[in-house]
Image (cartoon, rainbow, N blue to C red):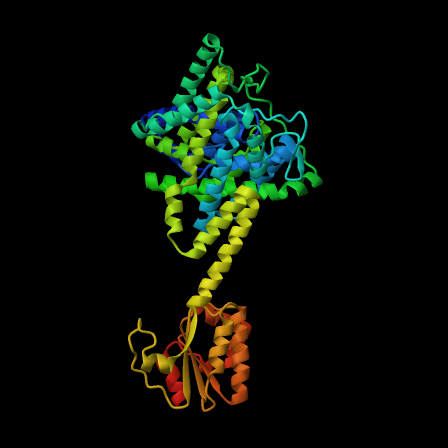
């Protein structure tokens, strides 16, 4: 049942809670301002699109979400996808893909698929997050150093022509290298000072984010130096040469439906899937972090529906994809946010800033925004998590490295798909390695399995006991076949001890069928011991229980050995 957390919160709402939400909402709105603008620019769209997203999507996520304190808006994770979509399909294509992603998110929530996000391995999440961080940082090198690539004549890069800044990592780096001669020393110094300021500020002051302070100071300094010393740098409103850069409106645009057609939907469907998956992962991860901070529990399915509503509404007003933002959510909690009202106030705060102070955003230096985004990328990369991961097993390192490299050099969607493939492969291999089929007589008398205490079992003559360690599935079938083939010719009874086999699949059933046929030819009776619920139910469904004989299936080894003895 869809029931937003806002409705639950209003039942016990009071003036004291409102004051806490008001303070937190205003602070988060101020914090979100430079981030919304920066993420929009990193995504290759007008800075105003970031504000529209933070206002519209931020309101929807708080009003309809399943978390008490989640703050939504544009995030760095989407910058890579959005930049590529805008470069290839334009803003209309982005709007179409975002609306489709919103519909997918609503369906995921409606069909209660919120828990499935937990099955995406930690190594993959770490890999693509680090890859996105590298891509974001690389995308800011142009503004950080004030580079002005010349596309008046198309550039030939790696066999392809580019008439504008490419979206892919490697071609973009090549463009920056070729444009090194256009470096603006003033922009470089400003960006470096801003970045250093943010790092130092965060060491001493936690309540007020350094990104907001540095944007204000850099804007004031930029205006003063331009008027007094004639120093020019690119700003949101204009380039250093005085030409127009971006236009910041002082009102929300009228809602407009994106162009939808069968061809467009078919073409952009994979992109919509990527946006939906990324929105689901990041929003639910953020909600889990928030739960840990406030000691509460969110409704993941309601949260997905809210994310879907937000991503349908955002492009109607010229916005970009949105999701739950961990940093802004944490800021909300640390400043006293108690209910979704704080998130709604955060959106209203941004709307007021847009209406009455939006025009001043045109003076913000691009170099300062580049410093903010590089700082975001640094925090996003998760170096402590990577260091811990690199100390682990080789299979986890392999999945992480593959996901990271494909995210940076190919595509985020491909990275997740390939990462899941590698993770599944290593998991299956691990299960195969852990699964064993051993001669129980040797195990009991020879002490092969030193980690288990010796059992005093009376194994009858002409009886072979094999213990299956781990699941019997398609990956371990061959081990089972090889072990059972070693049964001696004087064997009359083959006891398969399955106390440690909690899973059986079609491959395992087939192996049992083949084992039964081979034993029938040798006049050997198969007896099953210690079977668990899932394997037994599968034997029932497939008719294998009747084939083996129900009188030969037991829940303990003593009864099975008595059957052989009698």
Residue at figure coordinates x 40%, y 50% from the top left = 390
User: In the image as oriented, which residue stretches furthest toward the top?
Assistant: 228
In the rendered structure, the answer to whether residue 23 lies left or right of residue 354 reads: left
Residue at figure coordinates x 46%, y 78% from the top left = 483
User: In the image as oriented, which residue stretches furthest toward the front?
Assistant: 181
**Res 527 quadrant in image:** bottom left
Query: Looking at the picture, how far across and down is residue 245, in whole percent?
Result: 58, 19
- On-image quarter of the C terminus: bottom left
Q: Is residue 366 above or below residue 3?
A: above
Q: Is residue 344 above or below residue 434?
A: above
Query: In terms of depth relative to the viewer, which is nearer, 303 or 40?
Result: 40
Q: Is residue 441 above or below residue 5?
A: below
Query: In terms of depth relative to the viewer, which is nearer, 228 or 364?
Result: 228
Count of all numbered marks drawn on residues in the image = 0
In the rendered structure, the answer to whether residue 281 lies left or right of residue 91 reads: left
Query: Looking at the picture, how far across and down is residue 375, in whole percent?
Result: 42, 31
**Res 377 quadrant in image:** top left
Q: Is residue 207 above or below residue 486?
A: above
Query: Looking at the picture, how far across and down is residue 316, in whole percent?
Result: 59, 29
Residue at figure coordinates x 57%, y 18% from the top left = 247
Q: Is residue 84 visible?
A: yes
Query: Looking at the picture, how far across and down is residue 436, in whole percent?
Result: 42, 72
Query: In terms of depth relative to the viewer, which is nearer, 401 or 560?
Result: 401
Query: In terms of depth relative to the viewer, which is nearer, 349 or 121?
Result: 121
Q: Is residue 348 visible?
A: no
**Res 163 quadrant in image:** top right
């Amino acid at each position: 049942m869809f029931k937003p957390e806002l409705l639950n919160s209003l039942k016990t709402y009071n003036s004291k809670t409102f004051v806490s939400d008001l303070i937190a909402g205003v602070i988060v709105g101020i914090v979100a301002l430079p981030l919304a603008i920066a993420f929009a620019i990193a995504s290759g769209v007008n800075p105003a699109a970031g504000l529209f997203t933070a206002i519209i999507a931020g309101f929807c996520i708080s009003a309809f979400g399943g978390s008490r304190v989640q703050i939504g808006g544009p995030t760095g994770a989407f910058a890579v996808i959005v930049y590529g979509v805008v470069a290839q399909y334009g803003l209309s294509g982005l709007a179409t893909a975002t609306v489709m992603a919103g519909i997918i998110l609503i369906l995921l929530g409606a069909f209660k698929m919120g828990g499935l996000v937990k099955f995406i391995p930690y190594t993959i999440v770490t890999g693509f997050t680090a890859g996105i961080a590298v891509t974001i940082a690389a995308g800011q090198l142009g503004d950080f150093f004030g580079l002005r690539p010349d596309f008046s004549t198309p550039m030939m890069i790696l066999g392809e022509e580019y008439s504008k800044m490419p979206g892919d990592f490697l071609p973009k780096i090549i463009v920056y290298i070729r444009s090194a001669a256009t470096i603006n020393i003033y922009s470089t110094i400003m960006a470096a000072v801003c970045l250093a300021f943010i790092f130092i500020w965060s060491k001493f002051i936690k309540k007020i984010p350094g990104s907001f302070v540095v944007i204000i100071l850099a804007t004031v300094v930029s205006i003063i130096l331009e008027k007094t010393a004639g120093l020019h740098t690119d700003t949101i409103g204009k380039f250093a040469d005085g030409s127009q850069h971006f236009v910041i409106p002082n009102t929300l645009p009228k809602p407009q439906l994106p162009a939808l057609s069968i061809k467009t939907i078919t073409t952009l469907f994979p992109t919509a899937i990527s946006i939906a998956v990324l929105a689901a992962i990041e929003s639910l991860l953020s909600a889990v972090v928030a739960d840990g901070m406030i000691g509460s529990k969110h409704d993941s399915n309601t949260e997905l529906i809210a994310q879907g509503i937000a991503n349908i509404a955002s492009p109607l007003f010229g916005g970009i994809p949105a999701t739950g933002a961990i940093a802004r959510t944490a800021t909300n909690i640390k400043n006293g946010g108690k209910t979704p009202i704080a998130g709604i106030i955060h959106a209203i705060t941004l709307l007021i800033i847009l209406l009455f102070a939006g025009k001043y955003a045109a003076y913000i230096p691009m170099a300062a925004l580049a410093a903010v985004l590089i700082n975001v990328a640094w925090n996003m990369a998760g170096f402590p998590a990577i260091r811990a991961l690199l100390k682990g097993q080789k299979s986890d390192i392999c999945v992480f490295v593959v996901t990271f490299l494909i995210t940076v050099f190919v595509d985020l969607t491909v990275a997740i798909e390939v990462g899941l493939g590698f993770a599944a492969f290593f998991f299956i291999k691990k299960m195969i390695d852990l699964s064993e089929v051993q001669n129980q007589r040797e195990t009991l008398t020879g002490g092969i399995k030193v980690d288990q205490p010796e059992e005093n079992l009376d194994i009858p003559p002409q009886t072979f006991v094999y213990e299956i360690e781990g699941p019997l599935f398609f990956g371990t079938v061959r081990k089972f076949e090889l072990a059972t083939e070693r049964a001696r010719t004087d064997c009359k009874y083959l006891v398969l001890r399955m106390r440690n086999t909690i899973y059986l699949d079609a491959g395992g059933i087939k192996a049992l069928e083949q084992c039964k046929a081979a034993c029938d030819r040798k006049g050997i009776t198969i007896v099953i011991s210690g079977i668990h619920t899932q394997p037994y139910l599968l034997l029932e469904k497939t008719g294998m229980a009747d084939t083996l004989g129900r009188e030969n299936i037991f829940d303990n080894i003593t009864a099975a050995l008595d059957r052989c003895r009698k």
